[in-house]
Image: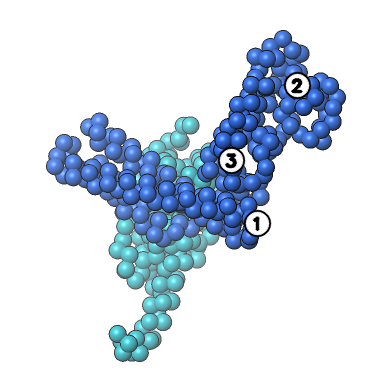
Chain colours: A cyan, B blue
């Protein structure tokens, strides 16, 4: 199967490959996988207190389309508010990268990765707020 | 019920007419095609014997001088037979086929990778990247290759444990304890196997490349 030029371009020059430190409080990490092919994708978003995505990193182990989808997504979400980023549909990725039908699941994976990363950030933020409130009793226990 | 186009006998869908021995191109599920009970635990010896027996009876060479309709039926019946045999023989393929039969897709609502498995994938892939980046024929490269080779053994052990889990799940299915729970478990096991398979494939490729270098 032939990959589109854009897939090949992202595959050869992936944007924003890498990781942020997991324990950074303003980083949300989404790990998703496609059990039908065994691909695994990790997307990390650095999100400001105002909810704007400042930076993104990804690591994807899978086919060219999965790598290109996540690479494209890191560019797409930067500068967007999470309320907007969470509405990004896989069809945008399919269109941009000209993905063939058999590779549509790669774009779905990238869409799910954004949602998972934002959910993780929200959860960490909530946990963080809760733990700062309980800081006194917690430090007593420790 | 279907009707044998050669002798007119009406019967349960089969690959071969029990009356006149003509091949039948009826669409069949894998279990019916091989005349095996619709169960997840399978007598592999019986499966194999059944496959060879039906292959002989349906072989297109036997119908070389028959009518075009019969020749065509023997080709299609043989294709169904082979596909069914391959599906049932392999426990992973059989499990995936079972999910299909009960209307569950492996990928549906199943994007979450178990955290410990994701951890493992990223760790091993980092090792592979390190191995790839190490200068060829250096001590560092040899050391990394040795680590990855050792890791390959651990991955195989994890895979073997997952396959044993799968067989256990099959036994429980056949006892029909709790279908909902068993479906979830079956999906979880088959997903783990898929991620492990891909990882092992990548490890093997990296080891292969390091040997070639």
Q: Residue at x 41, y 74 (%)?
A: A125
Foreground residue among B49 and A92 = B49
Label disc, if present, on residue B22 of the rendered structure: 2
Q: Residue at x 67, y 42 (%)?
A: B37
Screen quadrant of the N terminus of chain B: top right
Q: Are marks 2 and 3 in contact (CB under 8 Å)?
A: no
Q: Earlier in the sequence, mark 1 or mark 3?
A: 3
B126 relative position to B172: left or right: left
Q: Residue at x 32, y 87 (%)?
A: A141
B37 relative position to A126: left or right: right
Q: CA distance from mark 1 to mark 2?
A: 37 Å
B25 relative position to A141: left or right: right
Q: Chain of mark 2?
A: B
Q: CA distance from mark 1 to mark 3?
A: 18 Å
Q: Residue at x 79, y 35 (%)?
A: B12
Foreground residue among B85 and A25 = B85
Q: Earlier in the sequence, mark 1 or mark 2?
A: 2
In front of the other: label 1 or label 3? Answer: 3
Where residue A131 sits: x, y (%)?
38, 82
Label disc, if present, on residue B46 of the rendered structure: none
Q: Are marks 1 and 2 in contact (CB under 8 Å)?
A: no
Q: Chain of mark 3?
A: B
**Please, what secondary structure does the residue beneath circle 3 have?**
loop
Q: Residues within 10 Å of mark 2 (few under 14, many from 20)?
A: many
Question: Residue under circle 1?
Answer: B176
Q: Earlier in the sequence, mark 2 or mark 3?
A: 2
Where residue B159 sits: x, y (%)?
42, 48
Judge if badges 2 and 3 mark residues of a common chain: yes
Question: Residue under circle 3?
Answer: B43
């Amino acid at each position: 199967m032939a990959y589109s030029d854009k897939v090949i371009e992202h595959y050869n020059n992936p944007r924003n490959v890498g990781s942020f430190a997991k324990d950074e409080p303003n980083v949300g990490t989404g790990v998703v996988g496609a059990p039908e092919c065994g691909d695994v994708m990790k997307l990390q978003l650095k999100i400001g207190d105002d909810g704007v995505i400042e930076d993104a990193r990804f690591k994807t182990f899978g086919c060219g389309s999965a790598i290109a989808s996540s690479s494209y997504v890191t560019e797409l979400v930067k500068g967007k508010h999470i309320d907007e980023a969470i509405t990004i549909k896989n069809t945008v990725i399919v269109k941009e990268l000209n993905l063939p039908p058999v590779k549509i699941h790669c774009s779905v994976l990238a869409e799910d990765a954004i949602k998972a990363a934002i959910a993780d950030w929200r959860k960490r933020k909530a946990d963080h707020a809760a733990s700062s409130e309980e800081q006194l009793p917690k430090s007593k226990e420790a | 019920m279907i009707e044998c186009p050669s002798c007119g006998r009406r019967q349960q869908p089969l690959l071969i007419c029990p009356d006149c021995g003509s091949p039948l191109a009826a669409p069949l599920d894998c279990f019916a095609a091989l005349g095996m009970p619709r169960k997840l635990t399978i007598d592999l010896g019986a499966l194999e014997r059944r496959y060879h027996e039906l292959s002989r009876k349906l072989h297109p060479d036997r119908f070389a001088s028959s009518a075009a309709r019969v020749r065509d039926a023997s080709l299609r019946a043989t294709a169904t037979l082979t596909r069914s045999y391959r599906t049932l023989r392999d426990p992973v393929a059989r499990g995936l086929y079972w999910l299909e039969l009960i209307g569950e897709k492996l990928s549906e609502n199943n994007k979450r990778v178990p955290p410990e498995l994701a951890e493992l994938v990223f760790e091993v892939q980092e090792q592979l990247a390190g191995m790839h980046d190490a200068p060829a024929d250096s001590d560092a490269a040899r050391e990394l290759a040795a680590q990855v080779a050792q890791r390959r053994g651990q991955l195989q052990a994890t895979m073997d444990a997952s396959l044993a889990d799968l067989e256990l799940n099959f036994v429980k299915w056949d006892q029909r304890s709790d279908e909902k729970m068993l479906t979830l478990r079956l999906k979880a096991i088959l997903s783990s196997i898929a991620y492990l398979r891909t990882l092992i494939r990548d490890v093997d490729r990296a080891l292969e490349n390091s040997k070639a270098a």
